[in-house]
Image: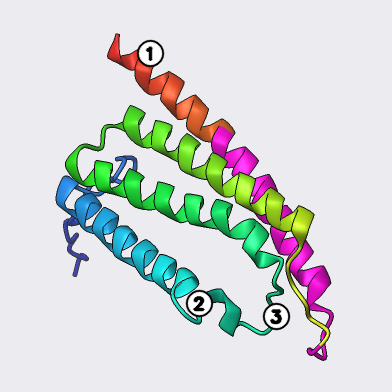
């Protein structure tokens, strides 16, 4: 008896599958909600002061951390209304640049105190910051490429 071939349901393997507009809008809305919650948790009482590993020097970094959160909220709010590739690429450049500035400031100030822990988390925190900084630089370069490519296609 010959095996029967069942048709494959879905797009061909070579097809580029992207989320539809409704899915993207839902994702942007979730991102807004998460960012608002983080903003409130960081800035409301007791806020960041409740975290024993953060020193008072975190106040020196807080404006850039807040700017990063607010930039994410603003970008996602715009994307809910309009999200062409060029606009998302531009938004990625802006939000990632602000996040990069916050991480560089975190590196400079290093408002962490891990003396109460049994593991040397200072090394871990610095490695995470370096990876975040490097990833942000790469992300900005990629977003600039997406922006240029999408604007060139528009002509």
Tell me which secondary structure the magenta stretch mostly adopts.
Answer: helix
Magenta residue span: 116-140
Q: In this figure, which residue is indicated by the disc labeled 1?
A: 152
Q: Position of residue 88 (x, y in %)?
A: 35, 36
Is the residue 147 above or below the residue 133 in the image?
above
Mark 3 or mark 2, which has the lower sequence index? Answer: 2
Q: Is residue 70 magenta?
A: no
Q: Residue at x 84, y 80 (%)?
A: 120
Residue that mark 2 sits on:
47
Name the residue tied to disc 3. Answer: 53
Q: What quarter of the picture does the C terminus occupy?
A: top left
Crowd tier of the residue under label 3, counting other residues whose Cα lies within 10 Å: few below 14, some 14–19, many 20 or above: some
Image quadrant of residue 52?
A: bottom right
Task: Give the mark nearer the N terminus: 1 vs 2.
Answer: 2
Q: Is residue 140 left or right of residue 82?
A: right
Q: Which quarter of the image is occupied by the N terminus?
A: bottom left
Q: List the single residue furthest toward the top.
A: 155
Label 2 SS: helix
Which mark is on residue 72?
none
User: Which of marks 3 and 1 precedes in the sequence?
Assistant: 3
């Amino acid at each position: 008896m010959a095996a029967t071939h069942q048709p494959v349901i879905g797009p061909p393997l070579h097809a580029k599958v992207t989320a539809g507009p409704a899915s993207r809008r839902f994702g942007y809305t979730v991102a807004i909600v998460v960012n608002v919650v983080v903003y409130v948790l960081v800035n409301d009482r007791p806020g960041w002061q409740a975290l024993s590993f953060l020193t008072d020097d975190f106040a020196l970094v807080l404006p850039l951390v807040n700017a990063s959160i607010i930039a994410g909220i603003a970008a996602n709010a715009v994307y809910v209304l309009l999200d062409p590739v060029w606009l998302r690429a531009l938004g990625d450049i802006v939000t990632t640049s602000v996040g990069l500035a916050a991480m560089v400031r975190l590196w400079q100030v290093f408002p962490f105190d891990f003396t109460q822990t049994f593991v040397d988390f200072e090394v871990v925190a610095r490695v995470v910051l370096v990876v975040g900084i490097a990833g942000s630089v790469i992300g900005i370069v990629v977003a600039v490429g997406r922006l240029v490519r999408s604007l060139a296609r528009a002509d």
